[in-house]
Image (cartoon, rainbow, N blue to C red):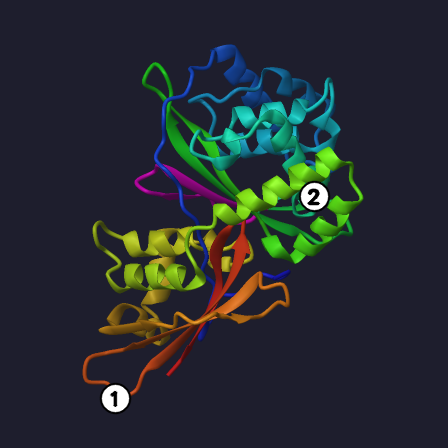
Amino acid sequence: LGSLLLLAAPLVALRSLRLSQPSILPAVSPRHATAAATLAAAAGGGGGPTDTQSAALATAQPSPALQPREVIETVMCALHRRNQDTPYARFGSEVAMRFLSPDSPASQRSLEQFADYLSQEWYRPLVEWSEMRWDGDLVLLGNGAEAYQQAGVRSSPTAAWVSIRWILARVLAEGGHEEWRVATVFVQEPDSTQSDDLEAAALALPAEAAAAISRWRKRQMAEQRLSPADVVEKVMRALRTPDEPHPLHGCEVAIRYCSPSNAASRLSPQGFEAYLREPWYAIMTEWDELQVEREQPEAVDPDGSVVLQDALVRRSGDESWTVVTWQLSLHSGTWLTDSLTITE
């Protein structure tokens, strides 16, 4: 999953996620909005956050004036290890949590739990980044209520870039204005690839820290909703009627279920629709019968974090089935699509 899958026949990369509806949030003063905007405008250089960026975190708050990229940059600076415990313990986590959507599971955690999450191996790119770049344009879905942005980070000029997918939602604040908040963050590596290392490391930790990790793992498993077969069927049915209940809805669903390493996650619904017009993808919008295998999917990785899921489709009158094989990986308890292969 280290490299991005290209959108080329007969292999297409698809992946996404699920956002909840916004809820009420407190209003923000103009002074706080200015501080966050100043910090975000300066982000993007090498070496992690600058002194100016770090100082601006003290008054950074959500605001209608902040655009999605500005919110992401502010949270990235807050999560950086330089600011995690400076000027006081868990400061960076405190700032980052200000920008969480109330529907994000992380917003329901305590400050201590949130800080514990950042100590896990798969969140290291968010904490140790030295350079950050935008990978593709900002994609707006749901009539502008959701924003998807792919970003890349690396820990040094010679390190490999790691893909991170940010999902933001517009939420309604007191006073009737809307502002962008972070709903979900997907890091490139699937969940389970480090699960064994996590459990092993927990044995060497103090009892309290080990118990916290154990509780986190149980919550993660409990929050898993859709199986790989469920995700594949949901995306396949959405693509079959791509303009119902509104134009490009099917493409929006497919994009939502794209993983961070899936090149299609960078596409707009209009761009995604253009690929569906290619002849080798015609079956995705023309099938009349669908059968999704419900047996245990084939594991690609030994730990089961990456799987292959088959779906059979055919048009009315066709004698043979077309096999659509999806590769999915697990991120933050959600199965997302990496790629698909169509075999006729």
Residue 328 appears in view: yes
Q: In which quadrant is the N terminus drawn?
A: bottom right
- Tag count: 2
Examine the rendered structure and indicate whether residue 289 appears above or below residue 52.
below
Q: Nearer the viewer, residue 52 or 178?
A: 178
Nearer to the camera, 161 or 221: 221
Amino acid type, callout 1: Glu
Is 241 situated left or right of 205 in this image? left
> Residue 42 location in percent, x, y?
63, 28
Q: Is residue 299 magenta?
A: no
Callout 1: SS: loop
Mark 1–mark 2 distance (CA, rounded to whole Å) = 51 Å
Q: Amino acid at mark 2?
A: Arg
User: On the image, which quarter does residue 243 sit in?
Assistant: bottom left
Where does the image place residue 311, in percent across and percent down from the top left? 37, 73
Magenta extent: 135-151
Residue at 75% over, 29% down: 82
Residue that mark 1 sits on = 319
Circle on res. 124: 2
Please tell me whether mark 2 sits on a helix, a strand or a loop: helix
The residue at 39%/31% (across/down) is: 170
For marks 1 and 2, the one nearer the N-term is 2
Q: Is residue 21 left or right of residue 295?
A: left
